[in-house]
Amino acid sequence: MNSRRASVLLMAVNFSLLGTIAYVIYVMKVGPNIVAGPTKTRVVTNTVTQIAVRKINATNLLAALANRPLNWRALESTNYVVYIENLRNFGCPEETVQDIIITDIAKLYARRRAQLRTQLHPYKFWQTADPIRGTPTAPPELQRQLRELDKEQRQLVRDLLGVDFRAEIARYWNEEASAERDYSFLPPAKQGAAQSITERYDEVEQEVYWRSRGLLLNADQEELKQLQRQRRAELSAILSPEELDEYDLRHSDTANTMRTQLAGFQPTEEEFRKIFRLQRGFEENFDQAFDSRDDAAMALKTAAQREAQEALNQEVRKVLGPERFAEYQRAQDTDYRALLQLGERFELSPEVANKVYSVKQGAEQYKLQVESNPNLTEEQRNQAVAALARETERWVAATMGDPVFKAYQKTGGQWLGNLPVVDESAVPPPPPQPTGTTLPYDINLLPPELKNFLLNPPVFPPPVKR
């Protein structure tokens, strides 16, 4: 959260507290016979003591009230533990207690962050940006200290109030509490421990990325893999195998990558689980780091990965069936994702992207057949490809509409410009698929003219011998 949003939040909370202050003073005036609640004994570490206790005041609230005017200072304390107990003894609602204390702590840490940021040099408009953070580079030690303050503040709120600072702040911005979403599948007794392990290793991994400055070397990659193994070992100690599988479905790199790559596929929960198990097995087989300077080792790894990827695709095909597998492969094509993105930008139906993609596949397949036909002269080949390109572009433009088509030509429609260019070195296409199998594209989605052109291609005369 940036400083401006934090300032607005603190101002809003402060205004809300004015009513609470008035209420407490009113209670103090009309109900002087207040019985103090039981005193709680807390063990406070040195770190928390330095922050939670700025100056020790009198802790006997009734004695303080007997010798002071009835005002807010009689209730407030610079010792957070005493401050909280005073508020509760007055019957202040727990939610309001949390608002008061969290706001006070936030202001305290805001001052400490401002103090640290004085180490930054004055802003210079000609100073270049950091390639990772996009802002003028701050000293790494300062960045570390600021992150430590964030952790310290969060831990202090948890120790004093038993709540998570980020989750409480998110409530003011109508943001979903990620902890409830990401760990609700676990028993309540295990949620906090799993979240703590996850956040601790996330922070250590982030340190590796910061240190790499955007250039991960083999040693960095191996360190990240080692951290992942350590994280998993700690999680395995507190979670059952079934719970660990559920955790991986929500938090693992494999699952996060799949959610990005399969955006256009929209898998069901069952499909996602099945593909995840296959994909995770594939990745575990290539978990070891390779020396990129060893050409022979890299060649072996590349060949092994290619074979394993083909085997993985066959397994996914068995799981999904031919039709859904074709959609699965389509979703991973960057050309198709560009069509989906364009459709979202112009609020088009996904069917437009599906139809244009099918036309693209059909046109490129037919072009390959023309290019590799040995019975065509160069002129015949050029004429056939040019006719195909004209008809395809006309249909795509009519389907998308003028403004969308112009944007598509600049963003993801480069294939239309390549369509009329004949590749003389094209290899012959693979043999036709047997009847009844799924074509690489849905021919029924093609425009009638192009569909007829592909199903009934013109018969070209044999080349003239010269």
Image: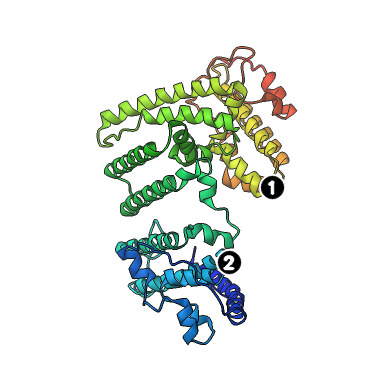
Q: Nearer the viewer, residue 126 or 55?
A: 55
Where residue 210 sits in the image (x, y, percent)?
A: 34, 54
Quick check: 453 left or right of 261? right
Instruction: Find residue 342 and report its image quarter.
Output: top right
- Numbered badge on residue 303: none
> Which amino acid does the dot numbered 1 rest on?
Glu
Q: CA distance from mark 2 to mark 1?
A: 47 Å
Residue 292 shows in this picture: yes
Residue situated furthest right in the rendering: 448
Checking the image for residue 93, the label placed there is 2
Residue visible at 72% across and 39% down in the picture:
399
Name the element at disc 2. loop
Q: List x then y, in percent, for residue 464.
A: 58, 16
> Quick check: 227 left or right of 248?
left
Q: Alpha-carbon neighbours of circle 2 within 10 Å: few (<14), some, or many (≥20)?
A: few
Q: Quadrant of residue 322?
A: top right
Residue depicted at 50% across the width and 78% down the height: 75
Res. 124 visible in picture: no
> Which label belongs to residue 347?
1
Q: Secondary structure at mark 1?
A: loop
Q: Is residue 238 above or below residue 85?
A: above
x and y percent of residue 133 in the render?
41, 59
Outermost residue toward the top in this view? 434
In the depicted structure, whether residue 260 falls above or below residue 110: above
Q: How many marks?
A: 2
